[in-house]
Image (spheres, rainbow, N blue to C red):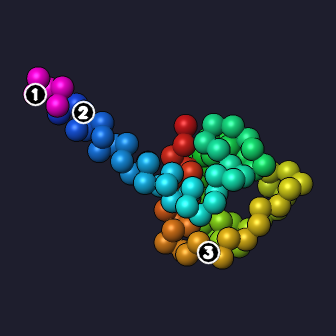
């Protein structure tokens, strides 16, 4: 019984940060154009994570794109600027996006 409780506790602890970042993505309206596993208007987060895998500057690059917007990387539809997202939130969102599988 103790092993089951420990396993559940560890699982809940691992899931909690991911859910908190998903909540932030929903609160900042990111999920209107993106999803974790499939393309909506913008790319799937798992595709973004794959593209930037191993890029040590990816969090900063994506955080800047989240705030300022961008175009041309994923097709003709530009990503609008998101001035309602501050730098700390953008970095948290970028790190979460890069962890998508």
Which residue does the numbered mark 3 point to in the structure image?
84
Mark 1 neighbour density, 10 Å: few (under 14) some (14–19) many (20 or more): few
Instruction: Write down the quadrant of residue 65 in the picture.
Output: bottom right
Task: Kindly give the residue lying farthest to the top in the view shown.
Answer: 1
Residue 8 is marked as 2
Which badge, 2 or 1, comes first in the chain's sequence? 1
Whether residue 40 is situated above or below residue 1 in the rendered picture:
below
Name the foreground residue: 90 vs 30. 30
**Residues at marks 3 and 2, CA–CA distance in whole angstroms:** 36 Å
Picture residue at 85% right of the left edge, 51% below the top: 75
**Which mark is first along the chain, 2 or 3?**
2
**Secondary structure under the numbered disc 2 in the rendered image:** helix
Of the image marks 1 and 3, the number of the one nearer the N terminus = 1
Give the spatial CA distance, label 2 vs label 1.
10 Å
Residue found 14% across the figure and 26% down from its top: 3
The magenta stretch is: 1-5
In depth, the one of 20 and 56 nearer the eye is: 20
Residue 2: image tag: 1
**Is any part of residue 71 visible from this angle?**
yes
Contact? badges 3 and 2 (CB < 8 Å): no
Q: Which residue lies most toward the left here?
A: 2
From the top left corner, tell me how far across and down residue 69 is, in percent. Answer: 74, 68
Q: Is residue 61 above or below residue 44?
A: below
Residue 4 is a magenta residue: yes
Quadrant of the image containing the N terminus:
top left
Q: Is residue 48 visible?
A: no
């Amino acid at each position: 019984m103790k092993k089951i409780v420990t396993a559940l506790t560890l699982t809940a602890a691992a899931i909690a940060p991911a859910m908190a970042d998903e909540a932030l993505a929903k609160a900042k309206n990111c999920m209107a154009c993106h999803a974790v596993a499939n393309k909506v208007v913008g790319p799937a987060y798992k595709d973004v994570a794959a593209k930037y895998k191993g890029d040590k500057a990816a969090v900063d690059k994506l955080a800047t794109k989240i705030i300022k917007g961008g175009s041309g990387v994923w097709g003709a539809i530009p990503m609008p600027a998101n001035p309602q997202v501050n730098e700390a939130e953008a970095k948290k969102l970028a790190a979460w996006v890069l962890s998508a599988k």
